[in-house]
Image: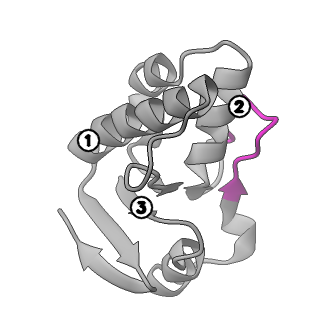
């Protein structure tokens, strides 16, 4: 598993496509409405949107990640890191921030490689 994290608009998808020579068709883009992940693609992009969809549907994203960790093992995953900055006032957004942090911790422990993108510059964390 390869985990690519970074803030909004830092170039995560472009990095993944260039670094691993992938086409758009090989990427599953999570959405705010979808609480199921298509594991048939090589890349799972925007995991943060999936986590928010789970929260909005009263599902536990951390449990989902733990229960399906084997399905993530051969994937490249991108996720927006929202751990920096101001803590949101709205409960749902605080829950999202915490859930993303927990999910990224689980995924990073199980990843072979973790990359953080900042201003389009990749930094290998693991």
Q: Does 116 sit left or right of 43 as displayed?
A: left
Frontmost residue, 16 versus 97: 97
Could you tell me what secondary structure mostly forms the magenta stretch? loop
* 79 inside magenta stretch: no
Report crowding for label 2: few under 14, some 14 to 19, many 20 or more residues within 10 A (C-alpha). many
Q: Residue at x 61, y 30 (%)?
A: 90
Check disc 3 and report its element: helix, strand or loop. strand
Q: Reply above or below: 3 against 16.
A: above
Question: Which contiguous range is marked in magenta?
Answer: 28-38
Check disc 1 and report its element: helix, strand or loop. helix
Circle on res. 5: 3
Frontmost residue, 23 versus 86: 86
Image position, residue 82 (x, y; %): 46, 51
Q: Reply above or below: 79 against 106.
A: below
Q: Which colour scheme is used?
A: one colour
Q: Does 125 sit left or right of 122 as displayed?
A: left
Image position, residue 48 (x, y; %): 57, 45
Using the rendered view, name the quadrant where residue 123 is placed.
bottom left
Distance from label 2 to label 3 (Cα)? 19 Å
Q: Reply above or below: 6 against 91.
A: below
Q: Mark 2 points at which residue?
A: 53
Q: Which residue is drawn at 66% across and 44% down?
A: 49
Image position, residue 9 (x, y; %): 59, 74
Q: Name the residue under label 1.
A: 110
Frontmost residue, 40 versus 58: 58
Mark 2 vs 3, N-terminal side: 3
Image position, residue 67 (x, y; %): 44, 18
Nearer to us of marks 1 and 2 is: 2
């Amino acid at each position: 598993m390869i985990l690519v994290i970074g803030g909004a608009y830092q170039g995560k998808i472009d990095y993944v496509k260039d670094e691993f020579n992938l086409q758009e068709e090989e990427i599953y883009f999570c959405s705010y409405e979808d609480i199921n992940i298509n594991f048939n693609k090589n890349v799972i992009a925007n995991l943060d949107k999936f986590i928010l969809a789970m929260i909005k549907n009263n599902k536990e994203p951390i449990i989902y990640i733990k229960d399906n960790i084997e399905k993530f093992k051969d994937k490249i995953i991108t996720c927006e890191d929202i751990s920096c900055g101001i803590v949101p006032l709205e409960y749902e957004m605080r829950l999202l921030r915490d859930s993303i942090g927990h999910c990224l911790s689980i995924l990073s422990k199980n990843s072979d490689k973790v990359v953080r993108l900042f201003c389009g510059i990749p930094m290998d964390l693991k």
